[in-house]
Amino acid sequence: MSITILFVLAPIGAIIAWWLSQQRLTAKPWLEVGAIDDFPGTGASSLPAATIGLGVFLAVVSSLFALFISAYFMRMQVADWAQMPAPKVLWFNTGVLILSSVALQYAQVAARRGRMEGVGDGLIAGGLFAFTFLVGQFFAWQQLNAAGYFLATNPANAFFYLLTGLHGLHLLGGLVALVLTIDKVWRGFALAQVRLSVKLCAIYWHYLLLLWLVLFTLLTPWVGEFAVICRQLLS
Amino acid sequence: MVDVTIGAAGVIPPAEVKDVELYHPKSWVTKYVFCQDAKVIAIQYSITALSIGLVALVLSWLIRLQLAFPSSLSAIGPGDYLQFITMHGMIMVIYLLTALFLGGFGNYLIPLMVGARDMVFPYVNMISYWVYLLAVLVLVASFFMPGGPTGSGWTLYPPQAILSGTPGQDWGIILMLVSLILFIIGFTMGGLNYVVTALQARTRGMTMMRMPLTVWGIITATVLALLAFPALFVGCVMLLFDRILGTSFFMPAVVEMGQHLKYRGGSPLLFQHLFWFFGHPEVYIVAVPAFGIVSDLISTHARKNIFGYRMMVWAIVVIGALSFVVWAHHMYVSGMNPYFGFFFAATTLVIAIPTAIKVYNWVLTLWRGDIHLTVPMLFALSFIVTFVNGGMTGLFLGNPVVDVPLSDTMFVVAHFHMVMGMAPIFVIFGAIYHWYPKVTGRMMNDMLGKFHFWVTFLGAYAIYFPMHYLGLLGVPRRYFEMGDMAFVPQSATTLNGFITTAALIVGFAQMVFLFNLIWSLFKGKPAGSNPWRATTLEWQTPETPPGHGNWGKELPVVYRWAYDYSVPGAKEDFIPQNQPAVPRTA
């Protein structure tokens, strides 16, 4: 729980507090009758609603995974914990996911510079890499299963399947949005109409990459020692 | 003398807020069923929540009948009783209160109060309702599965929740967990809308500090819910894994009927942490919207500006933040480091400060106000009294030394029913009587409303005051029957009979309310656009009930805060938020 509070809720709280501090919370609204022009900077943010919506959603996802990780650390302390080896294919998957993120970043830059063909290429490459990542994750599951690391044998295994599965589901949801965006590009929408979608896809992809790196670090055994140290520092 | 000059220097053209492209329903189905209009979604949410709430009300009668006449009702067995209390609690807290405050009032009031045409993501908003309905249907389905719904208590503590001694072990617990997971997914979709709409779709002139406290309450509660519900989600998913796939997240090694189960090593305490990390913010998810709404009801019906608006906003935010660091006060008896107990007792008691600020401000708003004892006002007043009553016993229970002997007694039941059962329900009733004229264009019947109020209000005290006493005697909660306990006198049974009688009468009064709700739809007095002479934007719509897109051709422009009641020198005792500033004339 301390992990959730330290790493997720405290930053989110800080962002909310910073934002509130911009809203003239010390104003005396009962004295301030008049048009908005007298009170600058108190309207809506200039960011599109969808961007803020995605930001709020990512805060929820962060809270969700932070709580899972808290539970992971708390459960780890019980004696029956037996860390399992990480399949080699995870390294490959990590590389592919990085490429996927790079491709989407490329698409986003292309969208900003107004090169439509670059947008299409970037999106499709990003989608294919992401799909490869999911297939790779499935392979990792199969390898573990074949090696006898079943879901219910040990809580470490269960957490591995649960966290990778949940991360994969989030990526799958992102792929739906990505396919819709690719469809827009194909049907020849103007650049102005797809630029925002491309940007949001790229943000979501970078977030999921970051999340994957955190999960990968926690789930592989060589960082088990590292996790122990972290846990001691945190609790 | 003051008069309003429209078109003078104080008036600005409504240009800067971009008008959104509205979705337009094309058929009856997209207008009333799969509708993306927040007002229709709000009504769908409200009707669903009230309907499932009615089920929970009937369950509470059955619980009370058993407690009053133990072992004389053959239809209710011990297993049934556990199922009744579980489902009563879960439905009331999550599927009624949370859904009604955020999904119902949030959807209806946020766009109207901030001057928006609709929610910012209408399609997602619509899906939110349908996922919620699915969650409710899954919950209802568990009543009809073999073994019935789960009887594990609304806290669903493992290991007992998924072991065979608990009723509903086959299907009940699975459907319960699936239903909660669905509810959380649906709520997240709606919650994104409520927050982003209040941030991004405010009309020109509606600064954060000009928003009515209702909106502040609802969006703060939504932020709490968005961050806290994931904890329940995590708990539910892991418990579901334990139940279906045989993992041992929460399940320790268990011997059941002489058989070693395959579980080992799991930590039941971990579930309690996750559950209460959600569970305590949940109390404020229900209470904070009530704080906001009741502030507006009191101000409007006392014809006086809210006292200490800034303090009210700050208090709402501080209460929200503190609610994340008190969860373990639900676990004093689960065993914890005494220093942790000290920490959580301290944070718990600190919440009394912002809460007390709010109560003082409500009372000071009433002070020398022109109080109209309308039905919404009666309910708002009853909220203050009841909330203070329930809050007082919270001070007892927040201290570990007092909590340990009182834990799991009827005292706790009385406490939380007062503070987060009756108090928010009073606000819901007040809010329904208050906004019903805007939603339907007709007033609710006043006589029936007053009857409903007095029976509910007095009845609530007849039910819950004696329950504190039972708790102090040591009568445990969740017990099917008491049997022979030396410390419980015979008179406790008589008292239980009295409480049950009161509960049945209060339940009957709710039928009067439902009758009023439906009867007024057809026969109610036409309300006009602003029957309470209120200042906030939702009362200034060109049509009543508000049409599609809420505002006709142009969005309203806001010139003042939401509480300009009884302004000295003004013609009327209220000045709507969209009335331009008045140049003082000599």
Image: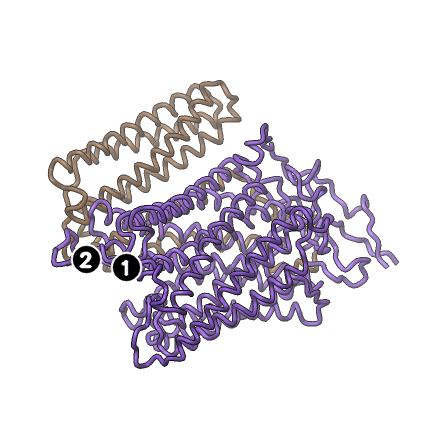
Where A190 falls versus B293 (above or below)? Answer: above
User: Dot 2: what SS?
Assistant: loop
Task: Give how far apart the Cα atoms at labels 1 and 2 are.
Answer: 25 Å
Around disc 2, counting alpha carbons within 10 Å, would you say few (fewer than 14), some (14 to 19), or many (20 or more)? some
- Residue type beneath disc 2: Pro
Mark on residue B129? Answer: none
Tell me if B20 is positioned left or right of A59 in this view.
right
- Residue type beneath disc 1: Leu
Around disc 1, counting alpha carbons within 10 Å, would you say few (fewer than 14), some (14 to 19), or many (20 or more)? few
Mark on residue A234? Answer: 1
Mark on residue B252? Answer: 2
Give the camera-side residue of B282 and A216: B282
Return the x and y of residue B460 as percentages of the image width and height: 52, 68
Return the x and y of residue B124 as percentages of the image width and height: 48, 37
Return the x and y of residue B273 as percentages of the image width and height: 31, 59
Instruction: Name which residue lies at 15% across and 45% down.
Output: A84
Q: Are marks 1 and 2 on the same chain?
A: no
Instruction: Name which residue lies at 59% across and 40% down.
Output: B118
Task: Identify the colour of chain A in the image.
Answer: brown
Where B404 falls versus A37 (above or below)? Answer: below
Subunit under mark 1: A
Tell me if B205 is positioned left or right of B129 in this view.
right
Q: Is residue A5 visible?
A: yes
Where A160 falls versus B263 (above or below)? Answer: above
Q: How many marks?
A: 2
Task: Identify the colour of chain B in the image.
Answer: purple
Image quarter where the C terminus of chain B lies is bottom right
